[in-house]
């Protein structure tokens, strides 16, 4: 018998309904020595992102004369999964994720405003429970905003899948291992444009459309949450500096 | 609200890790009462008019399913914690419970207590999981009381401790028994499963058997330890269909099957149970003597007369040890514990007994299952007079070591014993065949009737299907007489250059059966149509099978076509597949088609097509046989049935004509062509059919028989076997056929599988000597063909493949179900023929010629070609058997090597494959137990 990822009563294994996201939690500016940083939780998936820059390009040969150089490094804390195992930064998955997150961020940053500079983004997964890709992008996005780097739009990300013939928003690890398709979108909420779309399996087009729509709706909800968090943070900062006039 | 659940789990590598999972608690979970003022009522089911809202605990769900299925039980709350426990403990009960919940008339409501913020509880440090779940049930019951009012809510539990604690918490709690008594329907008490606490051991009907005591089952922890240190072995127990006192446990740790001999060592295990087995000391292993060992139990079982086995799956199992192993014997063991029960409901009847005086009192009766592998079951009933001459269904509740028989309870009555319809229903139930009418939801999926082909809709509006218009082609069908579900038609057009265009056109069922709609789901569960002697249980509703999809003559029908260009020597030069619309010009019977071909005066186009096709088919068949395909023989019996009484009027062998073989040949070719096409496009998720190569051991009985009559068979390859079968000619024309019949039963059946699960050489279809094979040609009556149509359509780019068909695990479980359904359909069909054979011979004792197929110590087994039945003929009285070995009693002696039995005075000799005359008649050794009996006419 196949696992019941959605009960006939309409509840998922962790008690959510199909269109519900996990609880999000974000802390802006967790690493004071960095130019920007953020902690982002999507349920039990916990990610930290740290941004340095814009600064001078460390290796001159890589300098770009018309725009900023964006570098991204993804890693997983050894304690991030149940099974503690040393994972290098160089394994294939990490390399691929570094690339994907880096490209997504680069597309959001107005790099032409910062020629001949370098921006370093470090994302580390502290705890993994499905949906790490999306959480990394969201964390990096907040950290970039925290660093005050000019962006076209806040880039947000959300995943969705399809199990038991039901589109499911924001899969956790258990659902992620269910063998269904797992689709991740990167989304510009103001521009209403997709910046990233990844899926690793073949599905009929009708299914694909439903899952994509759900992931996009999820991304919009992430955007609302992130904007609130950033606004809250600006207010705290402002009040700390005593400039806020309400 | 959020609560993290953490627990430890072992990984595949044996490491222990802590797993933390999120667990969301909600405030939007409804109570399900239609009269609740606060909750959302969109899915509510519990009625104000109900006397009680009943909350059941896990054990009630697990053990009282027959009661819960009775409509007297309604307005029941099933807690999520209960469902989860039931699901983990017994999947079949879980499925039954879900069926009741899904039925809107029953008002069962699932309350997701584990996700409700007020009813979720964390387990206490000292609490076992069971205690925690019992507490969760009480907490939820209490919540319901507060929510709906204390007077309304009732907790049903048979657990004394749980009931006491519930009452302490102020919850109204009752046992099942006392609750049912308040309903005022005493006959319902028959449905209540007896728990040990209620079991007042009433006198056994056979007091002398009271001494029988089974060994205690080991506790689970001991079993686990024993499995770990190699003392015990785990496996599924399979009881020998032909000798219920013998069972086998396939054990990976021993590497071969462990034999369990006798009820004592089977130790209360049922067929299908997963058991733990301990090997006996080697000195008590069963050696090569198996065939002669008398049953240790006193219930004498004997072989029955029945249909000839069609394959190894139908034939009795026999063990002959290889010479080297003879000294050691077979690994023999005894059951020490039961890991998982496989109890289901059984069909059967009450063992004839003396009726108690008076009525209405509770009596004990023994139930005898129609499935011979199942032991007798003791039941209590208050309605014995109603049950004694009925076929009934019974559930098993428990089997204590002090009890010779398991305890069970009555579930329902099927009908009168001996009534043809009832007996037929028994066969369907026993083979798990759903013969209920199709539901409204399924019928709603049918196109509006009457359906007819519309050019606009099918050629213009669905242009993407590229449906070809083949209505101008002379297409015809050839089927058994009276066939109404015609799923294949043919054409054969000569081309100017001497080649032929040959087409096989199959009903386009998937045009009407769309994936995942109720119609499709129902068909996939049924898996196949079932052909009983007097009725057909369809896989698809009649409007589809007999009208819309049936490729009848002179109407326009949708088809999926496979079209070849063939050389005049029947070489396939090219093949193409297309959806099409056809108009058959004739629906012929095999006899009609044959008559046309044979009548040299007929020169019309249709007849010419038939002759051309027949010529091509013969060449194809010959080529197939040269490649090593086996021409086996499995005699099929055909009844002529009285249309009014449904009683058989005549019986005889099904006549196979050239026309049959012609159609078969092109169907085989179409199936092979399609198999290649879909596998190329979907290498890992094609549904194929394979026929495993038989092992040398499986040929053992055939080789022994053949050697006894001086025939040498080469079984090294299917080609070698086919050739040596051709050479096996005896003194009479039937000899060769007989050898082929014996060869057929050495082989197992072909099976469906998902291509991704196996690798290429294993795809082989041994019997057809085909590297690839599938089923494409009968989508009206086989679901495998429906799947293959979808695969082919997707391979051609005409439609997208439904996502489940891309999923290997799904396809594997689908093919498992199809194999199971296919097997059951065959067994039911065979049993139906056997039932009608008995009905037929009841009024007509008949003398007939028979062939000896095997020599036994007390007689021989004969096969009666005319009726396709087989059974034992005893030369010595039954009472002599097993006592001292009848072969030594001075009258008959057996020469096993040459398969001869001769009387000691030398006056009579019987050798295997000899012809003898046999009387066939129906006897009734016990009331309501009619059976065929074969006796030698001296
Ligand atoms: Zn309520």
Image (tube, coloured by chain):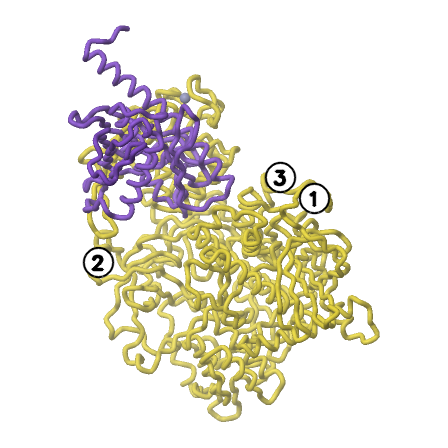
Chain colours: A purple, B yellow
Using the image, determine if residue B10 lies above or below residue A120. below
Q: Is residue B140 visible?
A: no
Structural crowding at the residue carrying mark 3, measured as other residues with C-alpha within 10 Å and reported as few (<14), some (14–19) or many (≥20): few
Residue at disc 1, secondary structure: helix
- Dot 3 beta carbon under 8 Å from ligand 1: no
Q: CA distance from mark 3 to mark 1?
A: 26 Å
A142, B514: nearer the viewer = A142
Q: Earlier in the sequence, mark 3 or mark 1?
A: 3
In this rendering, the count of numbered labels is 3
Name the side, left or right, on which B874 lies relative to B266: right
- Residue annotated with mark 1: B460
- Name the residue carrying label 2: B228
Q: Secondary structure at mark 3?
A: loop
Q: Which residue does the numbered mark 3 point to in the structure image?
A: B444
2 or 3: mark nearer the eye:
3
Are dots 2 and 3 in contact, CB under 8 Å? no
- Provide residue B323's location: percent of width, then percent of height: 33, 82
**Crowding near pointer 1: few (<14 within 10 Å), some, many (20+)?**
few
Are the residues at dot 3 and dot 1 in contact (C-beta closer than 8 Å)?
Answer: no
Q: Nearer the viewer, residue B74 or B476?
A: B476
- Left or right: B499 as drawn, with respect to B165: right
**Quadrant in the picture for residue B733:** bottom right
Which numbered disc, 3 or 1, marks the residue closer to the eye?
1
**3D distance between C-alphas at marks 2 and 3:** 54 Å
Disc nearest the viewer among 2 and 1 = 1
Single out the residue that lies furthest toward the left: A33
Ligand 1 located in image quadrant: top left
Q: Residue furthest front?
A: A65
Identity of the residue furthest to the top in this view: A246
Q: Is residue B76 above or below residue B354?
A: above
Q: Nearer the viewer, residue A104 or B252?
A: A104
């Amino acid at each position: 018998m196949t696992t019941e990822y959605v009960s006939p009563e309409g509840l998922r294994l962790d008690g959510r309904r199909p269109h519900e996201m996990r609880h999000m939690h974000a802390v802006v500016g967790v690493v004071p020595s960095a130019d920007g940083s953020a902690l982002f939780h999507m349920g039990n998936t916990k990610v930290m992102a740290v941004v340095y820059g814009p600064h001078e390009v460390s290796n001159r040969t890589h300098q770009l004369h018309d725009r900023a150089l964006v570098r991204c490094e993804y890693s997983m804390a050894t304690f991030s999964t149940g099974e503690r195992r040393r994972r290098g930064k160089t394994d294939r998955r990490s390399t691929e994720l570094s690339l994907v997150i880096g490209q997504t961020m680069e597309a959001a940053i107005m790099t032409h405003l910062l020629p001949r500079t370098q921006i370093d983004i470090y994302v580390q997964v502290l705890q993994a429970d499905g949906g790490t890709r999306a959480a990394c992008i969201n964390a990096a996005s907040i950290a970039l905003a925290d660093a005050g780097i000019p962006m076209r739009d806040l880039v947000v990300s959300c995943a969705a899948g399809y199990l038991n013939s039901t589109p499911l928003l924001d899969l956790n690890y258990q659902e992620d291992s269910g063998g269904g398709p797992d689709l991740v979108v990167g989304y510009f909420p103001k521009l209403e444009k997709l910046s990233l779309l990844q899926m690793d399996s073949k599905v009929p087009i009708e299914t694909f459309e439903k899952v994509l729509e759900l992931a996009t709706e999820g991304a919009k909800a992430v955007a609302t949450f992130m904007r609130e968090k950033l606004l809250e943070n600006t207010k705290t900062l402002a009040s700390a500096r005593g400039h806020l006039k309400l | 609200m959020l609560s993290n659940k953490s627990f430890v789990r072992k990984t595949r590598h044996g490491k222990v890790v802590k797993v933390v999972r999120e667990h969301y608690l909600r405030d939007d979970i409804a109570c399900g009462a239609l009269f609740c003022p606060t909750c959302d009522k969109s899915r509510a089911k519990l009625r104000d008019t109900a006397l009680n809202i009943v909350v059941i605990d896990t054990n009630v769900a697990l053990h009282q399913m027959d009661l819960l299925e009775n409509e007297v039980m309604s307005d029941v709350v099933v807690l999520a914690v209960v469902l989860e426990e039931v699901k983990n403990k017994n999947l079949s009960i879980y499925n039954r419970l879900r069926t009741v919940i899904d039925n809107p008339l029953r008002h069962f409501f699932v309350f997701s207590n584990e996700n409700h913020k007020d009813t979720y509880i964390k387990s206490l440090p000292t609490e076992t999981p069971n205690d925690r779940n019992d507490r969760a049930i009480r907490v939820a019951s209490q919540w319901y009381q507060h929510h709906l009012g204390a007077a309304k809510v009732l907790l049903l539990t048979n657990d004394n401790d749980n009931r006491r604690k519930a009452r302490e918490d102020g919850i109204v709690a009752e046992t099942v028994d006392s609750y049912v008594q308040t309903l005022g329907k005493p006959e319902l008490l028959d449905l209540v499963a007896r728990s040990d606490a209620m079991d007042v051991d009433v006198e056994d009907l056979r007091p002398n058997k009271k001494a029988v005591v089974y060994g205690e089952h080991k506790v689970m922890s001991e079993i686990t330890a024993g499995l770990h240190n190699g003392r015990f072995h785990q496996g599924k127990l399979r009881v020998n269909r032909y000798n219920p006192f013998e069972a086998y446990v396939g054990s990976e740790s021993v590497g071969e099957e462990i034999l369990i001999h006798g009820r004592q060592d089977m130790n209360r295990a049922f067929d299908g149970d997963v058991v733990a087995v301990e090997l006996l000391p080697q000195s008590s292993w069963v050696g090569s003597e198996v065939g002669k060992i008398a049953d240790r139990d006193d219930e004498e079982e004997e072989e029955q007369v029945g249909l000839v086995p069609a394959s190894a799956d139908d034939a009795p199992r026999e063990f002959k040890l290889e010479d080297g192993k003879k000294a050691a014997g077979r690994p023999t063991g005894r059951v020490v514990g039961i890991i998982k029960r496989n109890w289901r409901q059984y069909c059967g009847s009450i063992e004839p007994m003396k009726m108690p005086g008076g009525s209405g009192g509770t009596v004990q009766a023994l139930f005898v299952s129609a499935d011979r592998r199942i032991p007798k079951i003791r039941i209590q009933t208050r309605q014995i007079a109603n049950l004694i001459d009925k076929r009934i269904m019974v559930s098993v509740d428990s089997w204590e070591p002090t009890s010779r028989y398991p305890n069970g309870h009555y579930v329902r009555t099927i009908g009168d014993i001996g009534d043809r319809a009832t007996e037929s229903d028994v066969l369907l139930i026993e083979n798990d065949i759903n013969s209920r009418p199709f539901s409204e939801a399924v019928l709603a999926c049918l196109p509006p009737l009457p359906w007819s082909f519309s050019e606009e809709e099918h050629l213009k509006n669905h242009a993407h299907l590229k449906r070809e218009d083949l209505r101008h082609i002379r297409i015809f069908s050839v089927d058994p007489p009276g066939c109404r579900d015609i799923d294949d038609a043919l054409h054969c057009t000569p081309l100017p250059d001497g080649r032929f265009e040959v087409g096989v056109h199959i009903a386009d069922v998937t045009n009407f059966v769309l994936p995942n709609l109720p119609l499709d789901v129902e068909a996939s569960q049924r898996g196949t149509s079932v052909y009983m002697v007097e009725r057909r249980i369809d896989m698809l509703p009649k409007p589809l099978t007999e009208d819309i999809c049936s490729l009848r003559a002179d109407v326009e029908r949708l088809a999926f076509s496979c079209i070849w260009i063939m050389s005049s020597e029947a070489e396939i030069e090219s093949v193409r597949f297309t959806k099409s619309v056809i108009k058959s010009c004739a629906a012929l019977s095999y006899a009609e088609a044959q008559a046309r071909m044979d009548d040299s005066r007929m020169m019309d186009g249709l007849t010419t097509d038939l002759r051309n096709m027949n010529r091509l088919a013969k060449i194809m068949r010959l080529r197939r046989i040269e490649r090593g395909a086996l021409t086996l023989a499995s005699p099929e019996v055909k009844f002529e049935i009285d249309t009014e009484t449904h009683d058989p009027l005549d019986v005889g062998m099904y006549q196979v004509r050239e026309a049959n073989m012609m159609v078969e040949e092109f169907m085989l070719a179409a199936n092979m062509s399609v198999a290649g096409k879909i596998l190329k496009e979907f290498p890992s998720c094609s549904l194929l059919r394979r026929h495993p190569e038989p092992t040398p051991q499986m040929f053992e009985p055939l080789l022994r028989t053949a050697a006894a009559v001086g025939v040498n068979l080469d079984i090294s390859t299917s080609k070698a076997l086919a050739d040596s079968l051709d050479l096996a000619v005896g003194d009479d024309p039937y000899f060769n056929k007989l050898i082929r019949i014996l060869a057929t039963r050495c082989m197992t059946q072909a099976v469906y599988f998902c291509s991704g699960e196996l690798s290429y050489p294993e795809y082989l279809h041994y019997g057809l000597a085909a590297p690839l094979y599938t089923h494409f040609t009968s989508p009206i009556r086989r679901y495998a063909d429906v799947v293959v149509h979808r695969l082919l359509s997707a391979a051609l780019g005409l439609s997208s493949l439904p996502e489940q068909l891309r999923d290997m695990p799904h396809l594997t479980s689908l093919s498992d179900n199809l194999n199971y359904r296919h097997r059951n359909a065959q067994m039911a069909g065979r049993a139906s023929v056997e039932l009608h054979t008995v009905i037929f011979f009841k009024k007509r004792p008949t003398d007939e010629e028979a062939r000896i197929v095997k020599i036994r110590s007390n007689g021989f087994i004969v096969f009666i070609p005319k009726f396709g039945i087989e059974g034992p003929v005893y030369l010595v009285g039954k009472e002599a058997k097993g006592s001292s070995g009848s072969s030594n009693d001075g009258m008959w002696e057996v020469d096993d090597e040459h398969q001869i039995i001769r009387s000691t005075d030398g006056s009579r000799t019987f050798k295997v494959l000899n012809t003898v005359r046999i009387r066939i008649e129906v006897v009734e050794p016990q009331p309501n137990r009619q059976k065929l009996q074969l006796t030698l006419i001296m």
